[in-house]
Amino acid sequence: MKAELQAIQAEALAALKDVKTPDMLESLRITYFGRRGKLTEVMKGMGKLSKEERPEIGKLANEVRARLTAAFEETTQTLHRQQQEQQLAAESVDITLPGRKPAYGKAHPVMQTLERIEAIFRQMGFEVVTGPDIETEYYNFDALNTPADHPARDLHDTFYLTDGHLLRTHTSPVQIRAMENQKPPVRIIVPGKCYRVDYDVSHTPMFHQVEGLLVDKHATFSELKGILTSFARQMFGDKTQMRFRPHFFPFTEPSAEVDISCAVCQGKGCRSCGGTGWVEILGAGAVDPAVFEAVNYDPDEVTGFAFGMGVERIANLQFHIPDIRTLYESDLRFLRQF
Ligand code: DAH
């Protein structure tokens, strides 16, 4: 029996060395400690031993059982540790991997241009104000000296809404709102969206303008010219030339259209400027007395100058976009170029 116990111990310890999984361990445990297990059977046989044998064999049996129990426990621990290590390895994160770059957005080319325009005028002391996109006929036309029977009214292909409302066709109505809300002097620019029924390579139904208004006791045309020249040179370069061509706007008298020397060919003449060397960038003029009367400014007390420019047109001069409709097609392959 002594030999048998020693054999069981040796055999069990050897078998434990090969255990790889909790299942293998469990079946081994049953082989030795189960109800019909090898060690259990030996223990059951103890009763048949003689009185003399019993103390010695009993002691040995207890030792073997303790030894094996400890070995099983140790293997259980080892398996547990291995399993934890495997799990950690499987779930590990390589902190040296470069992170995923968030896709940063950036300003739309029209907004980039608008921001530059605003920055230039701000630094010349202009305040930025805004007004509603949905306007009344009064602010968009009547107060700007463009009554219903005025031919200029038909030049704007207006989106009419109900109840005398419309989508503003220009930012000029904000001149009226601004003057209604403050006494002279006024020195504002008005960036914003405008709408006209128009759609071709150089027109989109929604576009942007920046309006300018300068009202003071002695505002002069030369001051306007100086401001616009400074703006054009900051926007398009030091060498930019300007010319004022007489024009008509209902809300200014006299009025001018303002051209700059073509930034693409430096005035030599190219496709961009239609061979003339000049490109029109804005309309301007001296505020018509009728406009001052509409806002209760005294035309004998103040003079004013106003201008309005198309932002897409200016963006186009900077970025050379063949068809400005592409600005509003939301194609990222196009927009990422700017
Ligand atoms: N509102 C005009 C347009 O949309 C542009 C303009 C011309 C604005 C002359 C002005 C101005 O303030 O004085 O075509």
Image (cartoon, rainbow, N blue to C red):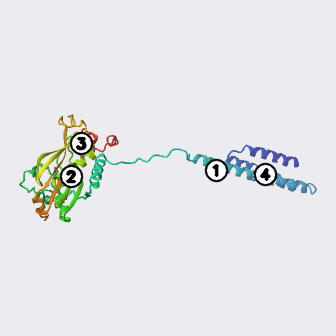
Mark identifier at residue 145: none
**Is disc 4 surrounded by few (<14), some (14 to 19) or many (20+) residues within 10 Å?**
many
Q: Amino acid at mark 4?
A: Leu
- The residue carrying mark 4 is 68
Q: Earlier in the sequence, mark 3 or mark 1?
A: 1
Q: In front: mark 4 or mark 2?
A: 2
Q: In front: mark 3 or mark 4?
A: 3
User: SS for tag 2?
Assistant: strand
Can residue 328 be seen in this snapshot?
Answer: no
Q: Earlier in the sequence, mark 3 or mark 4?
A: 4
User: SS for tag 4?
Assistant: helix
Q: Is residue 126 above or below residue 104?
A: below
Can residue 78 be seen in this snapshot?
Answer: yes
With 90 as the anchor, is 317 left or right in this view?
Answer: left
- The residue carrying mark 2 is 194
Q: Amino acid at mark 3?
A: Thr
**Is disc 1 surrounded by few (<14), some (14 to 19) or many (20+) residues within 10 Å?**
few
Q: In front: mark 2 or mark 3?
A: 3
Q: Position of residue 141 (x, y in %)?
A: 12, 56
Q: Residue at x 22, y 58 (%)?
A: 187
Q: Amino acid at mark 2?
A: Cys
- The residue carrying mark 3 is 240
Q: Amino acid at mark 1?
A: Gln
Q: Would you say the beta carbon of the disc 4 residue lies within 8 angstroms of ligand 1?
A: no
Report the Cα–Cα distance between label 4 and label 2: 90 Å
**Towards the viewer: 291 or 40:** 291
**Towards the viewer: 10 or 102:** 102
How many marks on residues? Answer: 4
Q: Is residue 98 above or below residue 214?
A: above
- The residue carrying mark 1 is 84
